[in-house]
Image (cartoon, coloured by chain):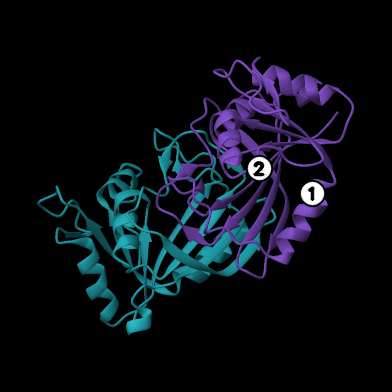
Chain colours: A purple, B cyan
Amino acid sequence: MRTVTFGVANSLDNFIARADGGVDWLQWTEEVAAFTSRFWKTIDTVVMGRKTYEVAAQRGTPAYPGVTNYVCSRTLTQNPAPAVELVTEDAVGFVARLKQGKGKGICIMGGGQLAAALFEGDVIDEVGLNVHPVLLGSGIPLFLPMQRQIDLELSEHQPLGNGCVLLRYRVKHRRRAAA
Amino acid sequence: MRTVTFGVANSLDNFIARADGGVDWLQWTEEVAAFTSRFWKTIDTVVMGRKTYEVAAQRGTPAYPGVTNYVCSRTLTQNPAPAVELVTEDAVGFVARLKQGKGKGICIMGGGQLAAALFEGDVIDEVGLNVHPVLLGSGIPLFLPMQRQIDLELSEHQPLGNGCVLLRYRVKHRRRAAA
């Protein structure tokens, strides 16, 4: 089964961007580049929500290179760009089916509604955060309210030279016992 | 100058309790007890907000033993219990004055409004979190919206055997340059 990772950089108060989408506070260092490069080799698919896609598209990078890019949306009716594939079906069912197929890992990009739905649907296997040493005070939240608790298991922790901390967790699946 | 520490245990999605105040998800281990014991020796004063006080009082522990307990409130008019001292003046000014006095460190208990006001007022020096490996999905938030960004510096990180991670930060004060 393919591994589904929800991975983002966040502030200590769990924002992924300022209210206006600004990410000027993100620190990009050689350590992060090396970590990202290693992770990137383990995946071949990116799944993002419409809002995350639109922010990325506005920045001129609608799709990540070298991987299949899916955009989940309940409002779009046609593919927003040739480089991405629109998914209009239920995101949990879609990702669950992707996991059963062949391929490398799958990365969920962006926070918000898509991540919350996929956590609730129990299709996310790993959470990777690059916790930045700042309280933004306001912004776009990493985690939205969820109907249930998600139990995690710490699998990796790495303080970086710039004061960021990489934390990685495995999701304790509800279904695992029955599998 | 006395050091003011904001220290709590939180879920990865930054709740300090379930919506009903429940903290059954908190893990208490010998490692945490040893850490807490060491920290407790460095302080002699606890400052908490009214809501935090009321939750503690309902549990039968309105005051922490061996330290001076202050309860900040804009609504209470008389001391709620003999073991605590009511503070009705502006909390930022009160804590700023406490810091100038003699004594050991000061610990801010609980999240929410008091912590946000004290962060905005730049009187908190350190942040200590015991990050638990769980997404609660809902609950009482650790951080409330703030009007400004608080820059931090990672000073300590320690993964515990139970999957929790202790993170400690120094607050980069705005006023330090002018001091």
Question: Where on the picture, by quarter, is residue A136?
Answer: bottom left
User: Which type of secondary structure does the marked residue at label 1 adopt?
Assistant: helix
Question: Residue at horizontal 74%, vertical 59%?
Answer: A33
Q: Is residue A158 left or right of residue A117?
A: right
- The numbered mark, 2 or 1, whose residue comes first in the sequence reads 1
On screen, residue B55 above or below B106: above
On screen, residue A130 above or below B106: above
Q: Is residue B42 left or right of residue A154?
A: left
Question: Residue at horizontal 78%, vertical 60%?
Answer: A34
Figure quadrant of the N terminus of chain B: bottom left
Question: Where on the picture, by quarter, is residue B107?
Answer: bottom left
Question: Residue at horizontal 76%, vertical 57%?
Answer: A35
User: Which type of secondary structure does the marked residue at label 2 adopt?
Assistant: loop
Figure quadrant of the C terminus of chain B: bottom left
Three-letter code, disc 2: Thr
- Name the spot of residue B49 as percent of width and height, x first: 28, 53
Most distant residue in the bottom direction? B179
Most distant residue in the right direction? A102
Nearer the viewer's eye, disc 2 or disc 1?
Answer: 2
The residue that disc 2 covers is A61
